Every structure is written in C-alpha cells, then in structure tokens.
Image: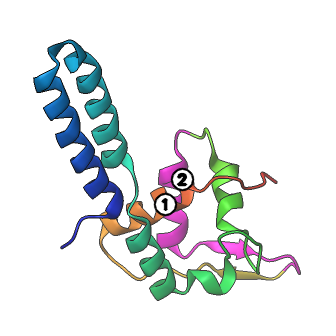
Amino acid sequence: MSLPRRAVCARIYVCFLHTLATLCPRVSLIALALICGITADNAAAADAGAAQSLAQKSGCFKCHGVDKKKDGPALRDAAAKYKGNSDAQQKLVYHVTSGEKVKFDDGHEEEHKKVKTSNLNEVKNLVDWILSLEGGTKY
C-alpha cells in the first residue's frame, strides 16, 4: 500500500528537519515543533482518494456534487452546515449509514441511500473528507 503524496512529503520534510537539527542544535526546538505540527496534521487528514472512491462506489455523486447542488446539497454545503458542530461526524455517519428519510425540494421523501461498506473506519474517513471541504454555503 503506497502512502499518500502528502504523507511522503511530510516524511521527507521530517528527515530534512532532523538533519538540520543535528547540524545546528539551536534550531532543534523549532524543528521539533514543526515536526510535531506536520505529523499531527497528517494523522488527522482524511484520505481523500479513498473517500471519493467510496462515494463513487456508493452512488453519492448521483445526488450530491462536491461543489454544486443536485437533488441533494453540495458536499461543501453539508460541510458548511456542520462547521463548528461538535457532533458533526456522529450525525453524518448516522445519515450515510441509517437509510433515514430525506426530503427533496419538490416535497417527496425517500430513504437516503446507505454507503456501501460495513467498515466504520471507511465511513468515518468519508465523513471526515466531507467535513474537511471548504467554501460551502450554510443554508
């Protein structure tokens, strides 16, 4: 399994900072702070490729665009709606796995399609990717 490009870049950067800190001990505290910041960022980052693949496999893009509304809201808009909400991940995981009723603009209701995986980590990765999207409109 290959590492995402961002993780590879971070590892190269960490090696560079380690070498720099060894050559110049005065910068070791700065280097350590930068290393911790980069590795923490990568640990929290969603795997966008895997999330998009699961969304495609599950048919999410039939009703949701990333940037524009279709029958369902744009994914960026969903992210904007839940921004700052402490239980956003929990709510969206439930939404994509429960088959709960959703209401359309014309007033009819349907069961929301369930994501096509039973792996909770894959579902959480999908939800984390959606929540990481910037630039949506809160409505």
Indicate which disc residue 132 carries: 2
Find residue 14 and report its horizontal and vertical position in percent: 22, 40
Q: Amino acid at mark 1?
A: Trp
Find residue 94 and report its horizontal and vertical position in percent: 50, 62
Q: Quadrant of residue 6?
A: bottom left
Residue assigned mark 1: 129
Find residue 32 and report its horizontal and vertical position in percent: 23, 25
Q: Amino acid at mark 2?
A: Ser
Q: Residue furthest right?
A: 106
Q: Is residue 85 magenta?
A: no
Find residue 117 and report its horizontal and vertical position in percent: 36, 79
Q: Quadrant of residue 124?
A: bottom left
- Horizontal side of 67 relative to 33 (left or right) equals right
- Horizontal side of 134 relative to 88 (left or right) equals right
* Separation of marks 2 and 1 at Cα, in angstroms: 5 Å
**Front position in the image: 25 or 8:** 25
Q: Secondary structure at mark 1?
A: helix
* Dots 2, 1 in contact, CB < 8 A: yes
**Residue 104, relative to residue 40: is it above or below?**
below
Crowdedness near tag 1: few (<14), some (14–19) or many (≥20) residues, C-alpha within 10 Å: many
Q: Secondary structure at mark 2?
A: helix
Residue visible at 29% across and 71% down in the picture:
119
Q: Residue furthest top?
A: 26
Magenta segment, which residues?
A: 86-107
**Residue 123, relative to residue 16: is it above or below?**
below
**Residue 23, relative to residue 72: is it above or below?**
above
Crowdedness near tag 2: few (<14), some (14–19) or many (≥20) residues, C-alpha within 10 Å: some
- Horizontal side of 61 relative to 97 (left or right) equals right
- Horizontal side of 59 relative to 35 (left or right) equals right
**Front position in the image: 36 or 118:** 36
Is the C terminus in the top left, top right, bottom left or bottom right quadrant? bottom right
Residue visible at 16% across and 33% down in the picture:
18
